[in-house]
Amino acid sequence: MNGLGRLFGVTLDASDDPWNLALKHASMWAQTQGRHFPPGPYEAMLEELGTRSAYIESAGTVEVASWLGPRPKPSDRPLVTVAQMQEFVGRGGLLEVMQEVKKFVTTRILPEVPIMVGIDHSATGGVVSALSEALGADHLTLVVLDHHFDALPPSARMITALQSELDLLRGNSACPARSSGESYCCGNFLAHLLGAGVIKPEHLLLVGVGDYPGEAAGPEWASYREAYLALEKLGCGFFSLEAFEKDYQERLRQFLRERITTPYVYVSLDLDVGGERCVQAARYMDGPGIDRRALIHVAEIIAQGSQSGAFSLVGLDVMEFNMHLLGLETPAGLPDMTLDTAWSFLDALTAKGSPTFLSAASVLAHPKLSPKVGRFEEVTR
């Protein structure tokens, strides 16, 4: 078959969060009692692949050491510690995995359309790097749906003594390896891509961010606010979580219509953007995100732009699955809909594998066949 979306997995979960590590240890103990679990989101997604799309085929997984995954082997127990995770990130381990993802996409996926499912959002850098190298940074827009803006150094987020104390007590961090300085990680991978010229700030769009600094932020947030808004001044575009209040549809449509000016688009979904609303199994959930209708609406608007010929969708991913919570009932008695939400987003974004989506493969095979730009506005009104 030609012109396929190629689904692949990256089962990387190098978090130093003690709660997450405790869940891993519980999983290892359960394995010694004969319990078996899907090792990662790729395997979980495959269970529905046959009934979802005839235009997407499985492409395997990027190899990751078992102790770095969400379901380590019982023999990995000595490695599943805060210190080991911090050491791995601090020495550039996540950057090495990102390079392996780039190699995997370049050699085993392109010119077909990469569709990645995984955990640590830093892996997105590998797919985007491969596409940027093939198509050119000037021609690629990256649309990220995320509750957090992953382009800030950890030091900018941990700006007050109170927050530092709470992080120490709770063991929480927006980015793994607090002691590793500004090593490449899920909390700052976008900054690394910007700094390396892999993406241009004017072609980086953030949708659903809940950490956008408001006017009412206190003086202790000054450095955070300055770091955030400095990137906005460079050209990064934001449609914040707050912007989804009330009648957001036309404003969202206009934002995407005006800001997507390149012939190629990559879409990255961090599941926490719908946390506590349509997603209950994301890795970092620190507040309610957007609801399912809004999430699908974003995908539909982008799909309409692709169908119009304004640009080609050349890849997408769904990241930050929490495998320990996936499919469980919430304390309030609600079933977890994370997998269904992920598939519904993918379906809406690809228009269920329509020929327009598949045309991206032809574009990658023949880069000179650039799609026409300028019809997005007409079709998405």
Image (tube, grey):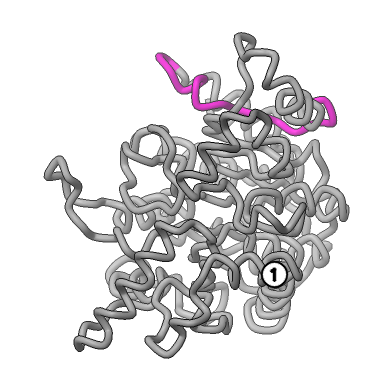
Residue sitting at x 46%, y 85%: 76
Residue 361 at what x, y percent from top left? Answer: 64, 68
Number of numbered discs visible in the structure rendering:
1
Q: Is residue 259 magenta?
A: no
In this rendering, is residue 220 above or below 230? above
- The one nearer the camera, 326 or 13, is 13
Residue sitting at x 51%, y 67%: 13
- The one nearer the camera, 148 or 25, is 25
Task: Using residue 338 as the reference point, say whether residue 94 is left or right of it.
Answer: right
Residue sitting at x 39%, y 76%: 71
In this rendering, is residue 226 above or below 198? above
Residue sitting at x 56%, y 48%: 173
Is residue 14 something one can see in this rendering?
Answer: yes
Residue 378 at what x, y percent from top left? Answer: 60, 29
Residue type, label 1: Met
Task: Using residue 24 as the reference point, say whether residue 317 is left or right of it.
Answer: right
Task: Using residue 235 as the reference point, say whether residue 279 is left or right of it.
Answer: left
- The one nearer the camera, 283 or 249, is 283
Task: Using residue 341 as the reference point, say whether residue 190 is left or right of it.
Answer: right
Farthest residue, direction top: 216
Residue 246 at what x, y percent from top left? Answer: 40, 14
Q: Quadrant of residue 317?
A: bottom right
In this rendering, is residue 294 above or below 45? above
- Residues rendered magenta in the picture: 233-247
| Residue named by callout 1 | 98
